[in-house]
Image: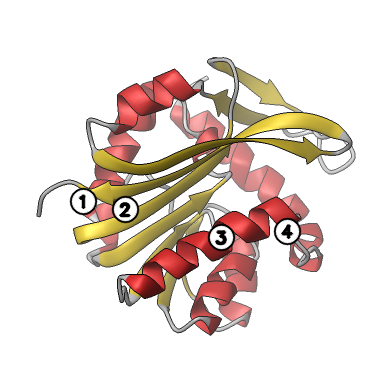
Amino acid sequence: MNATSIKDNLKKYYNQEAELRNSESVKADWKMRVKAEFCDLIKRENKKTLLELGAGAGHDSLFFMNNGLQVVAVDLSSEMVRMCREKSIETYELDYYDLSSLNKKFDCVYAINTLLHIPKDDLRHVLNEIDSVLNANGLFYMGLYGGKDTEKEIVKIEVSDVPRFFAFHSEDYLKDTLKDYFEIINFETLDVEINAKMDIFHSITLRKIGG
């Protein structure tokens, strides 16, 4: 499946799930922990601006705004963008392949469980786009479910019959890929519970290399 079809399906799915996502403001403890730890690092380094990728209904963007950051968010879904804007978040309907079109630079980029929708063949392009919008010494948090290196489509029929594309990455693959773009500050692999099943989550903190 090509990137255009993947994006079209993601837009359709998340437009349909938007109201549900907006109502689910309570996050799992492990999600709260990794977000809080990244926020603490941001404060220690006196960073001021943050871009969230795949902001959904805007709960995490609002968290960072409430912690004193100037936040910009992007999402593919027009419904998600609308919900973010209702929370007074500066938000754009945009994918990750053209972040430079924002014509903005940020001290930090935050992406949790969103870059797993990028095909492996496109990941390096997207990482380059992220690097292009980071200020010197900028921080990048990347969190995503992982495990074996696989790609597949998943249908969550209770929400929609539209399939979503997922790319799952091993720790070795991610470390080998990310080191070409960023300094790896911390790479933590967590065993987490999702819908009464155990899964693997990669929690990765990175820094822009060079200026």
Residue occupied by mark 1:
132
Q: Is residue 124 left or right of residue 211?
A: right
Which residue is more in the foreground, 180 or 186?
186
Residue occupied by mark 3:
35
Task: Say whether residue 92 is visible.
Answer: no
Q: Earlier in the sequence, mark 1 or mark 4?
A: 4
Tag 3 near tag 2, CB within 8 Å = no
Residues at marks 1 and 4, CA–CA distance in whole angstroms: 29 Å
- Name the residue type under label 4: Ala
Residue at 34% of width from left, 47% of height from top?
A: 206
Tag 1 near tag 2, CB within 8 Å = yes
Residue occupied by mark 4:
18
* Quadrant of the rendered image containing residue 183: top left
- In the image, which is nearer the foreground, mark 3 or mark 4? 3
- Name the residue type under label 2: Leu
Residue occupied by mark 2:
99
